[in-house]
Image (tube, rainbow, N blue to C red):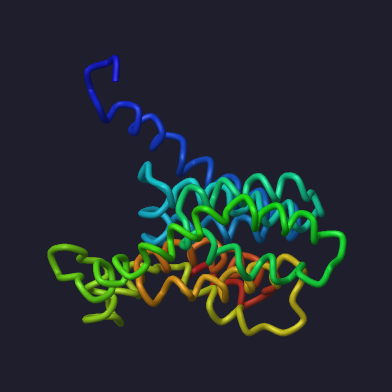
Amino acid sequence: ALSGNPYLGLRILECLFMPLTFLAALWLVWKYAGAKAALFTGFALLASWNFVDGALQARPESIDLLLFPIVIYAVMEAKKKTAGITSTIMVWSHGLASASSLFGVFIYNLFDKSWRKTLLFIALAVSPIIVLSFIFFNGAIHMWLLGQTQSSNPQDWMFWHNPFPWIIYYGGLSLFGIPFLLRRHKSQLEFLLTCAFVGNTFMLVFWADRWLHYSAIPWACLFGIGCSKLHGWKLAVMIAV
């Protein structure tokens, strides 16, 4: 504000959001699946408009994408305070959109008694936002699902009216993570990423382009972990792709 350029602060944030989100996702995969998996995860993220578009701009979902790998790490390591604080920040940032990306992750821990206090803290801390979200949910449905047009929301419009080429173009290499959602004998990290994706499908109903944004990191990480287990000619083909 003092600079006279009202967008300068946002541009500074945009210099930070995407690289930090990229590094956080790669660090998470590297820590639990190795450097090879992190390398392929990085390829998938950088070759996917759904990640670049979601992580680059200074807006609430950029905070969500940045904090998401930290939440997954906190759950993996049973760091309950970290999980509680970062999850609360996410939901206060972006309401139901954030809650949907966390829903599956914490359902995983619902029956673990040691997590009940943390889950209760999160529920109480985000309850005002959830209540407000449901109060205004009807307006969101009319604006983003029923009222969207090609000019008012071109990405959502493309998703529903020209889905095949648009999703291929926008999802990019992250879409290669979808087959790995069905892989059997998942590690704990893979299972949590799958749970996050399943919970996030709630957003598809009324905010399809954001659904692709929030799906980018789980898909890319699953792709990277899956590719790290390939060898020989299969690995060569994937590198060529």
Residue at the location (25% across, 71% down)? 142
x then y, percent, for residue 211? 42, 68
**Quadrant housing residue 47:** bottom left
Residue at the location (44% across, 57% down)? 132
| Near-viewer residue (241 or 51) | 51
Residue at the location (41% across, 34% down)? 13
The answer to whether 236 appears left or right of 232 in the picture is left
| Near-viewer residue (183 or 75) | 75
How many numbered markers are drawn? 0
| Near-viewer residue (239 or 197) | 197
Q: Residue furthest left?
A: 151
x then y, percent, for residue 151? 12, 64
**Quadrant housing residue 140:** bottom left
In the displayed structure, 14 sits above or below 151; it is above
Quadrant in which the N terminus is drawn: top left
In the displayed structure, 216 sits above or below 68; it is below
In the displayed structure, 129 sits above or below 212; it is above
x then y, percent, for residue 154? 20, 66
In the displayed structure, 170 sits above or below 17; it is below
Q: Residue furthest right?
A: 114
x then y, percent, for residue 208? 36, 71
